[in-house]
Image (cartoon, grey):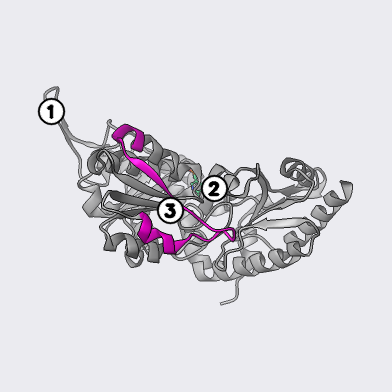
Amino acid sequence: MAYNINKIRSYFPVLNQQVYNKPMVYLDSAASAQKPVQVLMKEEKLHNDYYGNIHRAAHFMADKATADFEAVRDKIQKFINAESREEIIFTKGTTESINLVAHSFGEKFLTEGDEIIVSEMEHHSNIVPWQIVAERKGAKVIKFPFNDLGVLQLNLLPKLINKKTKLIAVAHVSNVLGTINPVSEIIEIAHKNNVAVCIDGAQAVQHTTVDVQKLDADFYAFSAHKMYGPNGVGVLYGKKKWLEKMPPYQGGGEMISEVSFEKTTFNEIPYKFEAGTPNITSVIAFGAAVDLLIKAGISEIAAWENELLEYATQKLKLINGLKIYGEAPKKSSVISFNIEGIHSYDLGMLLDKLGIAVRTGHHCADTVMQHFGIQGTVRISFGIYTTKEEIDIFLEALNKVILMF
Ligand code: PLP
């Protein structure tokens, strides 16, 4: 089936606007994606028709909201092919999902002297939670390095693992380098050594098919707002065998079974990890975003975005003094670059004045910046709605900016 970009774009009226009297070109979907009308309408409908707090209420509106909320859990289960719905936990986003694992897995399974292997290309969200728990438990964080192409040095992994290793934390796709990491191979090596793996899927689920059972991932985290859904919602997939043994992350409503001053018992998974009123509206609207991804087809999206990636990469390489960071053979929809003699912030600011939205700076990935000895980069990133024409407009603007210097 041909990818119907015009149809897809028609769902995102926000894209048809001018900024500074120039057509707006949005190349920052990796930071946060725009929202389609289906998501906006779902939010509105909920509030107009049947809003109520979920799970415990005894009235029509709350029952309907509960049913819709739980239906999204089923949808996500299918979307990533989890074995059971109990393995899908709603969180605030990838960051909270990873903090949950670090806290609860760490509390239960880490002891003094243990080691956690963390890849060098992680977002701060997949480094700092591990450092915090390592500090608390007297454990160590060990670096899993990448080479100058932005490829993880898989051959080093077996040597980094030892009897003390408890978990490996790695991104499925790097938010700076765009590298698609060999997570299947990493998991296979880890499991041969009885080591669990926590995958940061924030930059992957919207671009590539994810099957957590096929991957055999222990934990897989992602955010709705990067998947054309609302912000304030994320998912943690965790294997039942871990979640059942892990202590709660936060205490409060819904996560309990019974409370007394003498003793509190906890709810079953996934509710054990969902303390307090969740982001009901956003979870329900997230379902509409997942429907859109399914309807557009993840393989079709991947093919379209790969074409854009290839096209933009070839054109950028023709620019004098431009260096791309991340040249792995397998990449997703992100290109980071610098131009000799021009600060990334200046480039970003001037591109903005020409209507182009890009990201500049360290992209919450200081260890990637340190690897290359740089302060930051300009990053362009594509979404389901990006067109070749927009890449041309961006390239023209970039050339204009270069001429200004
Ligand atoms: N991990 C990666 C790879 C990311 O790109 C991001 C956000 O940019 C995050 C984690 C954090 O996601 P969130 O801010 O939605 O929790």
Asked whether residue 136 is drawn in magenta, I would say yes
Asked whether residue 222 is drawn in magenta, I would say no
Disc 3 Cβ-to-ligand 1 distance below 8 Å: no
> Residue 61 location, x and y as percent?
35, 41
Is residue 324 or residue 284 the one in the foreground? 324
Q: Residue at x 73, y 59 (%)?
A: 390
Q: Residue at x 76, y 45 (%)?
A: 347
Q: Residues within 10 Å of mark 2 (few under 14, many from 20)?
A: some
Q: Earlier in the sequence, mark 3 or mark 1?
A: 3
Is residue 389 visible from the viewing direction of this image?
no
Q: Assign a secondary structure to mark 2.
A: helix
Instruction: Tell me the CA gap for discs 3 and 1.
Output: 38 Å
Q: Assign a secondary structure to mark 1.
A: loop
User: Is 306 placed above or below 35 here?
Assistant: below
Instruction: Tell me the CA gap for discs 1 and 2.
Output: 43 Å
Q: Residue at x 48, y 54 (%)?
A: 145
Q: Amino acid at mark 3?
A: Val
Q: Which residue is mark 1?
A: 263
Quarter of the rendering occupied by the N terminus: bottom right
Callout 3–callout 2 Cβ contact below 8 Å:
no
Q: Amino acid at mark 1?
A: Lys
> Residue 362 location, x and y as percent?
61, 43
Callout 1–callout 2 Cβ contact below 8 Å:
no
Q: Which residue is mark 3?
A: 170
Q: Residue at x 68, y 57 (%)?
A: 324
Q: Earlier in the sequence, mark 3 or mark 2?
A: 2
Q: Which residues are magenta?
A: 134-160
